[in-house]
Amino acid sequence: MNNIHNLHGLDLSFFHRIDINLYPLFIAIYEQKSISNAASSLNITQSAASHALQRLRQQLEDDVFIRVGNKMSATPFAEQIYPTVKQALLTIQNISQQRHVFDPTSLKSLKIAVHDEIEPIILPRLAQHFQNLNLDLQFVSMKLDRKHIMADLATQQLDFVIDLEQYLSPKITFDHLVTDEFVICSQLKEVDLASYINGRHIGVSSRRTGALLEDIYLNQHQKISRNVFMRCQNYSTALQVLGAQADAILTMPRMILQHLSYSPKIRLHSLPFEMTNIKMGMFWHEDLRDNLRHQFLRHEIIKLFQ
């Protein structure tokens, strides 16, 4: 009879001593390094999360997490079991969803991170699209923080990150949404290659230092060195300066320009050289590929921008 409880190495009699509900908490604390944040993501109180952590420690006979400063740091044992536990929970989740039909009306929110300049291009279209579907969604648009993209997606603090196409990780997938091109803005009547190279340029970046967006694309093919006499934080300011600087040049994405106002003195020019188009889209975590809620959101967003 004992063999009945041992199928392919699985001891079924062992499971009455295991509280499987503790393991989502384990994943949440591991990924967010905070009991309070983990509790919030699981919709339980911090007190309940603390008590559950104590039970998990007893069950695993290990501290699992140790407070270091204001963060919960995983023990070596927790580091060892994390990939296995997460994969097991994903498997259980996928099995439980296989015969379910997703109900879009159950959607409560859509959380994205997007650059300030891109938000006017993306967010109004998203809001209108989901309103047309008669879905009562709360839209949360957060400031893009490229240092935390992978962590925010892995812990589901964000559903999607909207940004320029780039490689981040094997676990992060990119879906293309929009193709854009650079355009030259200036009061000059003509901007040829010589006047562009020798011109006085305005650059835009929210970062203190580092290459400007157009320079990254320029250096892929042209290796053009420019005289950037002003570096400001947003294109709206750059266009105001451009309206007062008769010989200045601003290179910017056309779609962003279409959402801004600028002086009638400013002329638009095509680039006097070849430059790669800008590809923008959404990043999401591969662990959510089979998640029905996430599948629905991905499908609708891609359909919107096709």
Image (cartoon, rainbow, N blue to C red):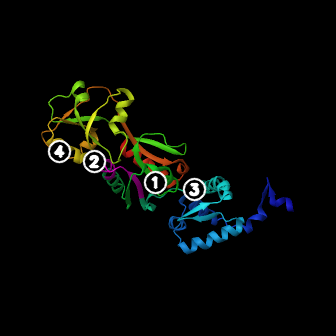
Q: Amino acid at mark 1?
A: Asp
Residue beneath the point at 63% across and 66% down: 22
Q: CA distance from mark 3 to mark 2?
A: 44 Å
Label of residue 240 in the image: none
For residue 56, say whether it is visible.
Answer: yes
Q: Nearer the viewer, residue 169 or 41?
A: 169
Judge left or right: residue 95 versus residue 304: right
Q: CA distance from mark 3 to mark 1?
A: 19 Å
Residue 173: x %, y % from top left: 50, 44
Of tags 3 and 1, the one toward the viewer is 1
Q: Which residues are magenta?
A: 110-123
Asked if the residues shown at circle 2 and circle 1 are in contact, with their CB atoms under 8 angstroms apart, the answer is no
Q: Amino acid at mark 4?
A: Tyr
Quadrant (top left, top right, bottom left, bottom right) of the C terminus: top left
Residue 99: x %, y % from top left: 58, 55
Displayed quadrant of residue 179? top left
- Helix, strand or loop under label 1: loop
Asked if the residues shown at circle 3 and circle 2 are in contact, with their CB atoms under 8 angstroms apart, the answer is no
Q: CA distance from mark 4 to mark 1?
A: 34 Å
For mark 1, what is the residue?
159
Q: Nearer the viewer, residue 263 or 216?
A: 216
For mark 2, what is the residue?
234
How many other residues sit within 10 Å of disc 3, few (<14), some (14-19) or many (≥20)? few
Quadrant (top left, top right, bottom left, bottom right) of the N terminus: bottom right
For mark 4, what is the residue?
262
**For marks 4 and 2 on the same chain, the one whose residue lies earlier in the sequence:** 2
For mark 3, what is the residue?
97
Of tags 3 and 2, the one toward the viewer is 2
- Helix, strand or loop under label 4: loop
